[in-house]
Image (cartoon, grey):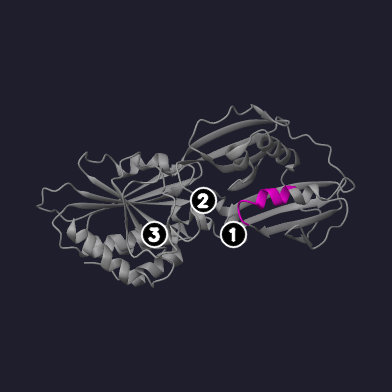
Amino acid sequence: MPFDLLDGARRLRERHGDRQSFRHALLDLLFAIGSPVREQALALEFGDTLGMEVVGPAAPSLEPPLVLVVVDVEPPHLPSVSRAAGRPAAWAPELASLGGPTTAVAWAACLHALASSTSQRPWRAHYVRGPAAGVAASLGFLIGELEPEAEVVQVVTSVRAQPITGPVDLMRIDLTRSRNVWRFPACDHSYALSSDLPWATAATALSELVEGLGPEINWTLHDLHIYQADLVHLSAVLRTSAQIPKQIGGFTTLEVDANQRLMFPVNDALGGLRSLASRFAGVWGKAMHQPLHLHVLPGGLSAFTLVPSTPQPALPARAGSLSLTWHREPLIAAPPSAVLPFVVGQDEHLGPIPAGLDGRTNMVWQLPPLVTDDDLPGVLRALGAAVSDV
């Protein structure tokens, strides 16, 4: 029997940030349905990928099966840092359809409609959640082999900002030095640096801040982390040879203990990233200037950015004094030819579509951004009519 969708949606929203608690909430909903459930997990470099498959009851119909797929992509971030900051990772508004609590609620709404339907057509519903760096490549394994005749529907929520359309890849760039050897400038002041900026300007604003200190102030930058939260959360420790204001260049500074243990500074890595960005014109140069995520490595800096799914320019083996390595994989799929909207408002756009189904999608179902319960009754009625007609 179907579960209470409003109560289930509330629990999924509340627990989405805690993976284990969220899994328990998801299983509670699935067990209420009484249909067979298959759960799989993969351990990837940047986090675990979870796959849930619900299979509808045996149906006498000879129609090809309906396969619904929802992909919940987590933005690049370090979970330990986001938990410590109290700011859970979340996609920017123009990328919000890639994943988040509303994506999980969209899957729950579709599952409720399927479980309530009297249609005799066989169906399966897949939910896959995992890190942006890896989830697309794991979809084929978690979903399994699809019947050639199956009708595959990918469910995507709307966004209210102008969306980024695909195909787009996620590129990881690592800048590493051969040895951590540095003659440190004398810096007597240490500041915890923080800011909430749009993701397109965060890294540029940081570069402008340190360059704006001028030649008379020495500085080193440590423990840098940039990740997408409600805006973009940026944190770092800036050491300087002279005092700086509490508010500077859009950043808040808080003086901290100068003797605290810090990671190796990333002055050279930031310079290498800027030099790399300056070598390319157009979208590639813009991508280097606008990373989605930055975090320090023991010997350098790692950056994640969005790049078009086109042949890339020849990247150098070095950026400044650091070695450069890179890896890219699909993140956003090409816009579909068939889209079926459900209770979508005039100010809502089809959001970016998570990649990984490799052209198997027959149609995209577009749902509104289910941030609150207001749209759920209307969506459920529309979904119920859709699955009863198929």
Expressed as whole percent of the image width and height from the top left, the position of residue 12 reads 40, 64
Q: Nearer the viewer, residue 14 or 199?
A: 199
User: Where does the magenta region start and end?
Assistant: 198-207
Looking at the image, is mark 2 or mark 1 earlier in the sequence? Answer: 2
Quadrant, the C terminus:
bottom left
Find out whether residue 203 is within the magenta segment: yes
Measured in 3D between alpha carbons, the distance from the residue under mark 2 to the one under mark 1, in whole angstroms, is: 12 Å
Q: Which residue is mark 2?
A: 75
> Could you tell me if residue 87 is visible in this image?
yes
Q: Which residue is mark 1?
A: 231
Instruction: Look at label 3 and name its amino acid.
Output: Ala
Specify few, some or many for label 1: CA neighbours under 10 Å numbering under 14, 14-19, or 20 or more.
some
Q: Amino acid at mark 1?
A: Leu
Quarter occupied by the N terminus: bottom left
The residue at the point 31 percent across, 44 percent down is 361
How busy is the neighbourhood of tag 3: few (under 14 within 10 Å), some, or many (20 plus)? many
* Secondary structure mainly formed by the magenta segment: helix
- Determine whether, in the image, residue 172 is placed left or right of residue 276: left
Residue 340, relative to residue 370: is it above or below? above
Local secondary structure at mark 1? loop
| Residue annotated with mark 3 | 104
User: Which circle's residue, 2 or 3, is located before the other in the chain?
Assistant: 2
